[in-house]
């Protein structure tokens, strides 16, 4: 008896999604729990797996808008065993494959089943990544790569041609576009800037990151350091953590920090809830967890709901300075940027120091210049002297002496 594959509900308010990409071909043998299709909603992308072994028959095409609960494929039972007969072993002696580097495997944009096959067969992760640029690697891709049928795909170059490429925007990209235009039209957004001398924080990372990793399983990341500084600064400037709700001002007594992460389908913002109560190690673990989930399109709708403040880091792409755009209904967003050695004046002497520009975009309807500038200066002070984070923003010696 054929088994139906239906579109699962990604959230209460979502009734329609877009079929982004089939990960298998019509008539292909699939295995239970193998990812067969990627679905785009207006908030996230997620894969759908096969419920059983069998031959898949596709009932919808890539790019189709389909209702939640609609049947997009069926699985027909195959042979009695549920699996295709194995091909005879190659008589040639098997080559010994080197072990896969776990670090390289973790960076690979591939489905769980594809990762498993890559590890089992000792496939070179960087090489297969080059063979499928910008694509989530599937089981069939790995098998093609191993058999040598797939050669590196080079991106098309501009030249003496009048060719054009046209493709449908994803639901996620359409929703993002709608929200960005709404921010521009419905808020009084301004941006204020400052710069941070990163010497002390970078020294802390270099000195303690290895010991920190041995104890907690994660290193010390800049995002978690800034998240910790933000939770402290927001307690001094609660207006920055507030937002307009109808004709009222909502001021949460907690900090839910959104971490902007670049995913294959676009920017997503998972939320670390009650960040003000988390240690640096707990913050770093959540940041790492969300980054991995974003790369693999594993983030859930619940993990991206809400948020009172957002941090985005354009520095990972080389951005020296930018004006980040608000994440509604939040009233502020902090932009981190590239660390660059620059000549600066310290104690009336010109020295070269690792400097980072930071930017705070804010809704002027909620936040005045005093709060925005004061908040940014507070973050600057905490990052330039991380010991102050231990004393909850106070001078460490004053805290020690209880003054």
Image: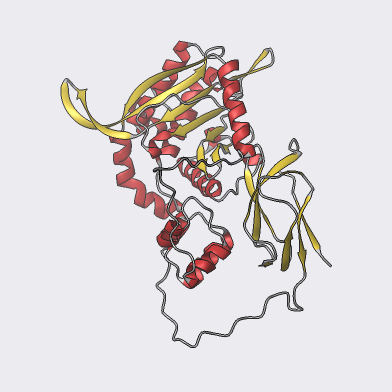
Quadrant position of the C terminus in the picture: top left
Residue at x 77% of width, y 70% of height? 77
Q: Is residue 221 left or right of residue 69?
A: left
The colour scheme used here is secondary structure
Please provide percent x and percent y for residue 127: 41, 61
Please provide percent x and percent y for residue 35: 64, 58
Please provide percent x and percent y for residue 192: 42, 18
Q: Is residue 151 left or right of residue 17?
A: left
Q: Is residue 204 left or right of residue 135?
A: left
Q: Is residue 227 above or below residue 121?
A: above
Please provide percent x and percent y for residue 182: 61, 21
View extreme (right): residue: 1
Q: Is residue 335 above or below residue 186?
A: below
Residue at x 75% of width, y 77% of height? 79
Question: In this orientation, which residue lies closer to the viewer: 116 or 156?
Answer: 156
The number of numbered discs placed on residues in the rendered structure image is 0
Camera sees residue 147: yes
Q: Is residue 323 above or below residue 133?
A: above
Camera sees residue 401: no
Q: Is residue 337 left or right of residue 23?
A: left
View extreme (left): residue: 349
Question: In this orientation, which residue lies closer to the viewer: 155 or 206?
Answer: 155
């Amino acid at each position: 008896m054929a088994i139906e594959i239906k579109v699962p509900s990604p959230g209460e308010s979502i009734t329609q999604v877009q079929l982004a990409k089939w990960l298998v071909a019509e008539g292909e043998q699939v295995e239970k729990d193998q990812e067969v299709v990627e679905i785009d909603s207006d908030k996230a992308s997620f894969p759908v797996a096969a419920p059983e072994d069998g031959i898949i028959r596709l009932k919808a095409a890539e790019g189709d808008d389909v209702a939640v609960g609609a049947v997009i494929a069926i699985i027909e039972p195959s042979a009695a065993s549920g699996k295709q007969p194995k091909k005879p072993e190659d008589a040639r002696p098997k080559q010994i494959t080197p072990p896969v580097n776990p670090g390289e495997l973790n960076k690979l944009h591939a489905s769980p089943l594809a990762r498993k096959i890559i590890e089992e067969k000792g496939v070179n992760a960087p090489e297969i990544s080059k063979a499928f640029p910008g694509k989530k690697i599937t089981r069939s891709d790995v098998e093609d790569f191993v058999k040598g049928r797939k050669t590196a795909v080079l991106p098309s170059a501009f030249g003496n041609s009048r060719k054009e490429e046209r493709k449908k925007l994803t639901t996620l990209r359409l929703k993002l576009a709608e929200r960005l235009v709404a921010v521009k039209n419905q808020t009084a957004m301004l941006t204020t800037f400052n710069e941070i001398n990163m010497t002390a924080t970078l020294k802390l990372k270099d000195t303690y990151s290895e010991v920190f990793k041995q104890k907690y399983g994660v290193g010390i990341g800049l995002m978690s350091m800034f998240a910790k500084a933000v939770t402290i600064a927001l307690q001094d400037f609660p207006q920055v953590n507030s937002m307009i709700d109808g004709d009222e001002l909502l001021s949460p007594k907690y900090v839910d920090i959104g971490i902007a992460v670049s995913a294959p389908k676009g920017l997503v913002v998972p939320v670390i809830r009650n960040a003000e109560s988390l240690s640096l190690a707990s913050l770093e673990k959540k940041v790492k967890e969300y980054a991995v989930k974003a790369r693999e399109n594993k983030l859930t709708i619940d993990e991206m709901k809400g948020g009172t403040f957002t941090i985005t880091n354009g520095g990972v792409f080389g951005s020296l300075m930018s004006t980040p755009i608000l994440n509604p209904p939040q009233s502020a967003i902090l932009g981190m940027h590239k660390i660059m050695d620059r000549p600066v004046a310290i104690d009336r002497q010109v020295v070269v120091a690792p400097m980072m520009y930071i930017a705070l975009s804010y809704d002027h309807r909620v936040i005045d210049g005093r709060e925005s500038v004061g908040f940014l200066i507070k973050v600057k002070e905490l990052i330039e002297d991380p010991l102050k984070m231990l004393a909850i923003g106070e001078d460490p010696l004053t805290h020690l002496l209880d003054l």
